[in-house]
Image: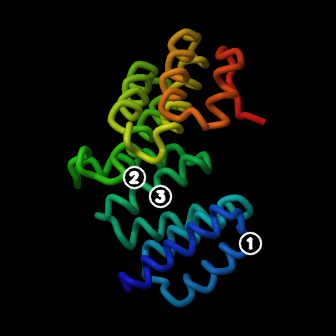
Amino acid sequence: MSQNREQLNDRALELLKAYKLDEYREMMEVMVQEHPEDAHVRLHYGTALGVTRPDEAIEQLRAAVELAPDDPVTLTQAASRLFELGEFGLSQKFVSRPGRLVTLSEFVLGSDLVNLAGRLAAEQGDDDRARALLQAAVDVGSEDREHARYAKDLARFLASRGAPDPAREAVADALADHPDDVELRWMASTDPQAPSEAP
């Protein structure tokens, strides 16, 4: 199944990047019938259901973790999707496991995991821990494809906690590394006291 899984992941990412969400969901509906015991298929299906059928999405993400309880990639990705669905308690439950299974500095999703832990800490009101983790994700994920997003998360957190100058600094530093990022450029031109999504 490994080759099929790689092909599945490639095709799924193509559909997501092209915002062909209906086609992505339909593809996953077929795949989950053909491979119900594959955690990655369940993970993709849960992602596909997230916008229109969130309750079913949560069940698919739970199923993915049950099928691969010791797979740090599945745990991290499921925790991230659950966070996006507002299931912070369940996300926290899953996000704590990968750190016991892998060395974060060697884990391909290590920076994602640290960033997610920071966002969860912010939701729980642990601002000191949130700031440290969000900053750590920016620092250790400098070569990561999601580095700009980590910086945006840090800047939004800082601004929401009444620290506009550090928020501006976080945006400026990230913009130096990602000068073509439209959202970063927009954030740099607005009041960081209440940054929101770029139009």
At 40% from the left edge and 45% from the top edge, which residue is drawn?
Answer: 144
177 relative to 98 in the view: left or right: right
> Could you tell which of marks 2 and 3 lies nearer the N-terminus?
3
- Look at the picture and state if 133 lies above or below 12: above
Q: Tell me the quarter of the image containing the N terminus.
A: bottom left
Residue 129's x, y, as percent? 38, 24
The CA distance from mark 2 to mark 1 is: 28 Å
Q: Which is nearer the eye, 86 or 183? A: 183
The CA distance from mark 3 to mark 1 is: 21 Å
At 54% from the left edge and 19% from the top edge, which residue is drawn?
Answer: 158
Q: Which is nearer the eye, 148 or 107? A: 148
**What kind of element bears circle 3?**
helix
Q: Tell me the quarter of the image containing the C terminus.
A: top right
Residue 44's x, y, as percent? 54, 69
Residue 143's x, y, as percent? 37, 42
- The amino acid on which the numbered mark 1 sits, given as a three-letter code, is Asp
The CA distance from mark 2 to mark 3 is: 8 Å
> Could you tell which of marks 2 and 1 lies nearer the N-terminus?
1
Q: Which residue is mark 3?
A: 78
Number of callouts: 3
Q: Which residue is mark 2?
A: 94
Q: Which is nearer the eye, 190 or 2? A: 190
- The amino acid on which the numbered mark 3 sits, given as a three-letter code, is Ala
Q: Which is nearer the eye, 192 or 186? A: 186
At 51% from the left edge and 72% from the top edge, which residue is drawn?
Answer: 10
Q: Which residue is mark 1?
A: 22
- The amino acid on which the numbered mark 2 sits, given as a three-letter code, is Phe
Task: Judge the density around disc 2: few (<14), some (14-19), many (≥20) Cα neighbours within 10 Å.
Answer: many
Pair 2/1: label in front: 1
131 relative to 140 in the view: left or right: right
Task: Judge the density around disc 1: few (<14), some (14-19), many (≥20) Cα neighbours within 10 Å.
Answer: few
Pair 2/3: label in front: 3
